[in-house]
């Protein structure tokens, strides 16, 4: 009771007689205001044990009375306080992880690298992303990422015709999602009236619990086509065209309707690239190669790449596995090292048969009689006591394929050690003069055979255990020589392509970028005749390879190598799993893709599944999610690290569906298939074509008929739905397209390449393709559309 009430009560005892005549009745008291309503406040029972946390009895339920303790004790829900009732209902809702849109911190379009950072944050030691709220992140156990090229925004917004689609997937009835904001603003977003309505709905109640708010007091409203997020500091946040939109708020074709049953939002996604040079990066390499975290690198890797710059030449030697992966025919010593690394030593029957076939076909191998130990090392020398030769060969086409026509060998001092023309054993069908520089006249008087060259090289490469061979993609040169040698340095692997693996930079580009000189200009100067001749010069190419190796030795392993700036996502996940406090198993990764991913980007993954169809990709994802390493016996002598590895599980899966990409001609092979069909058609007809000698200009592939495209889209969506249904609980599911439509960009790039080739040898009036500023501007616009036309979906299966 307040002080004013106490004073009023004390004065009330003598107010009826004071100041009145005796016997006079007092006046009627003034009417009292109605009593205030009672407040239903919760009663807190402070008890020990488990009940102390929520104020519950030991049995988890207790009987409540009113605020004064006069309850009826029957536990009736109608007598319980409203807050307590809501809290009790909330406790019965299972807590599952989920993704919540947070566009207040979304300042630009989500990029492929942002999706990579999300994976690193969920499973490893990545930094928390700001553009997405993740509730109960620690409960997310696995992440499955699927790349689906060909699935772009025009399919969702109706720009691509899908009218003639078959009813493969029945259209679902849309649920009532509240008031929908239509995308009819000038910039593709909602109108001002729609925004005012949506923002008006986003308000913070005084009794709103912190659990219901997002990070930093953000409040969210998801009952509209555009998710609008306000905050106490910025309640009028306005969405832009790069904001995610609800799938329920946009009309989808029946073949896409099933996406609503998996995802809530579609995110416009941009492919990473260079805005200044207008280049686009590979969405695969960008996702699977995060930036190198130098602070958390193991000591041996950090010292190798970031120690002293100068290195010895043996650090550049290819390993037996690298030789095998890059299609080198293995020397017997290299094959033996691969077997021993895998726990075997004896040659299998198939390996013996293959080696006998090679020798019968004229192959030879160098005689490795010694060892490559420290006895041959010269301390402080970059050559480390080895004998180094740089090799380049020129070939021509014969009846059975390519055969050797010239070989050049350069020593470490840059002087010519061996240079000769070679007479192929079979008739020549194409001299390839524009590349090899070989003509019929040059080979008329040549009697040197491949066997003669092999005999000379076997004598030159002695002792073989001290000889190192250098070359650009040297496997093709050794195939022409039919020679096997174990110690190889391939310059195409020393310096990586700007787009990363599996691309390899050409020798011409490497020489111009790192040595600042031009080679392979279409002609070369013959040092003997001092005349300009067409084609490449094998001596010039061999010198370029030698100088690239010397530069690498001087600058160190990190020079010219993108890999030291990035690392495999699979390696990063395996190393960073320890930062997750709720995980006690190793974070293994798996790759499921078309072709042979183990030879490209999947070699570091624990499990690799090679597929030929999207159906096999779906089955492969199911297989790797349930895969477990072989259990080790209960032996106390087993290395604890090996036991930890045996207890691991596949926590990350990267897969790719490609059938939609190929159906729409996004794979880049449409022009090649078109040219093949044109050649076959020309061969089948007897009517000569006046334009048969003119090169076919590349064209941009078109989508198949609407019914065919809709059927392929429905199949792709059905594959995603099947994958989602097979996921275990608490698994994050991310789907991204990689890029937008690249077909026009590919067509213009092909035209530009054609122009550059013709411009070297023809006059402007003779060019079939003329590249002007108009074509360059069109290419820039096409690259921008390709970068910004992608999309992504993300959700967590509860």
Image: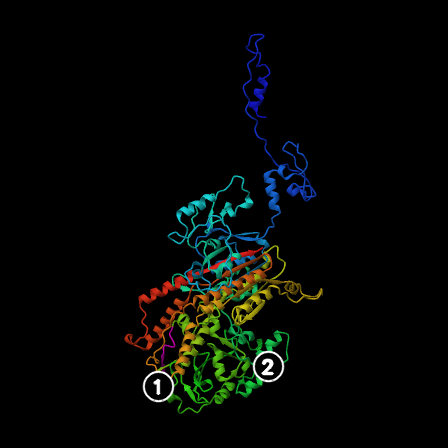
Question: Helix, strand, or loop for circle 1?
Answer: loop
Instruction: Say which quarter of the image contains residue 446.
Output: bottom left
Determine if the magenta segment contains residue 528: yes
Between label 2 and label 1, give the one nearer the viewer.
2
Which of disc 1 and disc 2 is earlier in sequence? 2
Q: Position of residue 219 (x, y in %)?
A: 50, 46
Quarter placement of the N terminus: top right
Q: Extreme left residue here?
A: 765
Q: CA distance from mark 2 to mark 1?
A: 48 Å
Query: Which residue corresponds to the image point at 59% horizontal and 31% vertical from the top-left?
Result: 38
Where the C terminus falls, by quadrant? bottom right
761 or 743, nearer to the observer: 743
Does residue 545 appear left or right of residue 586 in this picture? left
First to last magenta residue range: 517-532
Q: How would you rate the neighbour count of disc 1 (Cα within 10 Å): few for under 14, some for 14-19, many for 20 or more?
A: few
Note whether 170 is above or below 52 in the view shown: below
Q: Quadrant of residue 534?
A: bottom left
Q: Which residue is mark 1?
A: 529
Residue picked out by circle 2: 351
Q: Is residue 731 above or below residue 446?
A: above
Label 2 SS: helix
Residue 163's place in the image compared with 244, above or below, is below
Res. 315 mark:
none
């Amino acid at each position: 009771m307040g002080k004013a009430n106490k004073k009023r009560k004390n004065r009330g005892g003598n107010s009826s007689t004071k100041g009145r005549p005796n016997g006079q009745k007092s006046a009627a008291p003034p009417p009292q205001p109605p009593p205030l309503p009672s407040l239903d406040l919760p009663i807190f029972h402070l008890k020990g044990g488990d009940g102390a946390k929520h104020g519950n009895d030991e049995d988890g339920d207790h009987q409540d009375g009113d605020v004064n303790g006069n309850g009826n004790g029957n536990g009736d829900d109608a007598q319980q306080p409203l807050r307590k009732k809501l809290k009790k209902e909330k406790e019965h809702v299972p807590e599952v992880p989920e993704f919540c849109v947070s566009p207040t911190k979304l300042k630009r379009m989500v990029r492929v690298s942002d999706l990579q950072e999300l994976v690193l944050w969920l499973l490893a030691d990545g930094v928390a992303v700001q553009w997405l709220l993740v509730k109960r992140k620690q409960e997310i156990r696995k992440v499955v990422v699927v790349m689906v090229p060909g699935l772009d925004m025009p399919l969702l917004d109706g720009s691509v015709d899908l009218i003639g689609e078959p009813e493969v997937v029945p259209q679902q009835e849309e649920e009532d999602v509240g008031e929908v904001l239509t995308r009819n603003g000038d910039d593709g977003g909602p109108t001002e009236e729609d925004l005012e309505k949506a923002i008006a709905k986003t308000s913070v109640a005084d009794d709103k619990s912190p659990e219901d708010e997002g990070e930093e007091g953000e409040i969210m409203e998801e009952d509209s086509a555009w998710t609008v997020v306000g905050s106490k500091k910025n309640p009028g946040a306005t969405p832009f065209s790069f904001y995610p939109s609800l799938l329920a708020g946009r009309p989808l074709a029946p073949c896409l309707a099933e996406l609503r049953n998996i995802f809530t939002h579609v995110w416009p996604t941009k492919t990473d690239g260079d805005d200044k040079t207008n280049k686009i990066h590979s969405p695969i390499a960008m996702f699977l190669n995060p930036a190198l975290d130098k602070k958390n690198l193991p000591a041996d890797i950090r010292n190798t790449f970031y120690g002293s710059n100068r290195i010895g030449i043996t650090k550049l030697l290819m390993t037996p596995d690298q030789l095998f992966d890059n299609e080198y025919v293995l020397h017997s010593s290299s094959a033996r090292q691969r077997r021993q690394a895998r726990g075997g030593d004896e040659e299998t029957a198939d390996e013996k048969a293959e080696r006998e076939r090679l020798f019968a076909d004229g192959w030879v191998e160098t005689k490795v009689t010694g060892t490559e130990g420290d006895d041959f090392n010269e301390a402080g020398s970059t050559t480390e006591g080895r004998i180094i030769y740089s090799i380049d060969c020129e070939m021509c086409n014969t009846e059975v394929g390519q055969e050797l026509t010239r070989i050049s060998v350069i020593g470490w001092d840059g002087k010519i050690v061996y240079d000769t023309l070679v007479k192929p054993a079979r008739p020549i069908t194409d001299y390839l003069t524009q590349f090899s520089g070989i003509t019929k006249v040059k080979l008329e008087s040549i009697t040197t055979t491949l066997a003669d060259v092999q005999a000379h090289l076997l004598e030159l490469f002695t002792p073989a255990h001290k000889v190192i061979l250098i070359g650009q993609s040297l496997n093709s040169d050794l195939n022409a020589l039919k020679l096997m040698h174990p110690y190889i340095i391939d310059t195409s692997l020393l310096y990586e392509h700007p787009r990363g693996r599996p691309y390899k930079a050409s020798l011409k580009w490497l020489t111009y970028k790192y040595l600042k000189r031009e080679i392979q200009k279409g002609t070369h100067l013959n040092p003997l005749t001092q005349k300009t001749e067409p084609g490449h010069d094998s001596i010039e190419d061999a010198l370029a390879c030698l100088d690239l190796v010397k530069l690498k030795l001087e600058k160190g392993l990190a020079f010219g190598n993108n890999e030291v700036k990035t690392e495999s996502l699979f390696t990063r996940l395996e190393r960073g799993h320890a930062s997750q406090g709720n995980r006690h198993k190793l974070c293994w990764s798996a790759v499921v893709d078309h072709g042979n991913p183990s030879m490209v980007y999947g070699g570091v993954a624990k499990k690799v599944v090679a597929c030929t169809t999207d159906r096999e990709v779906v089955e492969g994802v199911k297989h790797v999610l349930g895969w477990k390493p072989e259990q080790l016996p209960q032996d106390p002598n087993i290395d604890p690290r090996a036991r930890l590895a045996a207890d691991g599980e596949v926590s990350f899966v990267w897969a790719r569906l490609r059938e939609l990409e190929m159906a729409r001609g996004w794979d880049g092979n449409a022009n090649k298939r078109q040219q093949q069909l044109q050649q076959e058609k020309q061969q089948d007809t007897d009517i000569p074509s006046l334009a048969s000698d003119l090169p076919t200009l590349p064209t941009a592939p078109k989508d198949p008929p609407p019914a065919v495209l809709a059927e392929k889209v429905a199949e792709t969506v059905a594959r995603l739905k099947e994958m989602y249904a097979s996921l275990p609980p608490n698994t994050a599911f991310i789907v991204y397209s990689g890029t937008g439509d690249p077909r026009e960009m590919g067509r213009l790039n092909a035209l530009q390449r054609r122009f550059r080739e013709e411009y070297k040898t023809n006059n402007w009036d003779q060019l079939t393709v003329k590249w002007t500023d108009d074509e360059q501007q069109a290419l820039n616009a096409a690259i921008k559309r390709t970068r910004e036309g992608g999309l992504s979906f993300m959700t967590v299966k509860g």
